[in-house]
Image (tube, rainbow, N blue to C red):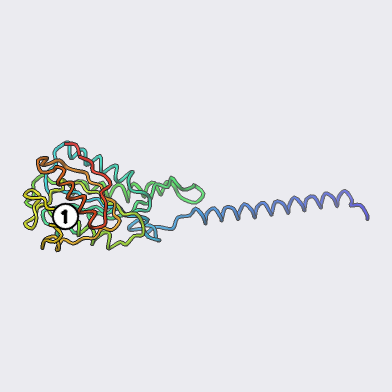
Amino acid sequence: MARLSRRAKKQQNREIVFGLLIILTVAVIVALVGYQLTHRSDGYDPETLCPLSGPKGHYVLLVDKTDPLSFTQKTALQTLFADFVEHKVPQGNLVSVFVVGEDYTQNSKPLVEICNPGTGEDKSELTANLKQLRRQYSKKFITPLSQQFQSMVSDKSSKYSPILEMLQMVNLESYKRHPIDGERHLLIVSDMLHNTPGLSLYKKIPSVEEFQTSTYGRKSYLELKEVDVELYLLINSPQYQGDELMEFWHSYFESVGAKISRIVPMPG
C-alpha cells in the first residue's frame, strides 16, 4: 500500500479536525435546544400571569373588616400581608383576596385575583429575560396586591359580620370558579365571631350538629374539600373568644372537608 504524501496527510488531518468541529458544533446546538425545551416556561397569560397550563395551586386570603383595627393590629396585618404576598404564595399559584364586610353581597367578588409569575430566579439568562421577569413580578404582581391593603381595613364598626356567607362566596367565586388540581389554602384574618340575625356567636356558640340541622345552618351549606385553613385571630372580644369558639370552628371546617392547620393570635 502506497504511503500518503506529506501534503495528503495534512489534508487528511484538516478534514478530520473539520469533521470533529462539525460534530462538536452539532452536539452543542442539540444540547442548547434540549436545555431550552426542558427549562422553558409553559407560557403565561398576560392578564392573570397564570401558566397557560393552569395555576399550580390556589391561595385565598379573607380579611374581616367589620371592626376597625387598632394601630398594632393594622401594623401586624401589614406585616402578615407582605409576607403572604412575597413569601407564602409559590410561583405559578393563584392568589385571591376577599374581605368580610357588613353586606356580603357587596363583597362577593375578590378585590384582586392574580398568579405569582415568579422573579425568574429559577431560570437562566440563556432562556429568559431575567430583568423583564423581575420587572413583571414587581409591577404586575406585588404592586396590584399591595394597592388593595387599604381596602382590607375599615375605620368604623359594622352591625353584622357575615363570616359564614363570605365563606360561601369564597367557595363559589374562587375555588369553584377555578377548579385547580393542586393545593388549596385559605388564610382568614378575623375574630371569628360570626354575627347576623340568623346566628350570633356573641349570644350562643352551638355545637356543629345543632348548627347544621338548623334552618340557618342548612342555608349556609358549604363544601371546602381538602382546603388547608389558617386562622389569624383578631382578639377583639376575648371574653367571647375562648376554647368553645375555637372548638366550633375546628368542628365546622372538619365537617365541610377542610382542616385548620394553625391558629395564630394577632398582636394588639
Identity, as a three-letter code, of the amino acid under mark 1: Val
Left or right of 35 in this view: 223: left
Task: Farthest residue to the right: give it.
Answer: 1
Q: How many marks?
A: 1
Q: Nearer the viewer, residue 130 or 66?
A: 66
**Residue 109 horizontal/vertical position (percent):** 21, 59
**Residue 221 horizontal/vertical position (percent):** 18, 62
Q: Nearer the viewer, residue 128 or 266?
A: 266
What's the residue at 27%, 51% (across, down)? 259
What's the residue at 32%, 45% (across, down)? 88
User: Residue 164 is drawn in which quadrant?
Assistant: bottom left
Q: Which residue is mark 1?
A: 208
Left or right of 75 in this view: 41: right
What's the residue at 73%, 52% (across, down)? 18
Looking at the rendering, in which quadrant would you find the C terminus?
top left
User: Label 1: few (<14), some or many (≥20) within 10 Å?
Assistant: some
Left or right of 236 in this view: 4: right
Above or below, comparing residue 210 to residue 82 in the picture: below
**Residue 63 horizontal/vertical position (percent):** 19, 49
Residue 156 in view, yes or no: yes
User: Residue 107 is drawn in which quadrant?
Assistant: bottom left
Residue 153 in view, yes or no: no
Looking at the rendering, in which quadrant would you find the N terminus?
bottom right
**Residue 122 horizontal/vertical position (percent):** 45, 47
Element type at marker 1? helix
Q: Nearer the viewer, residue 44 or 176?
A: 176
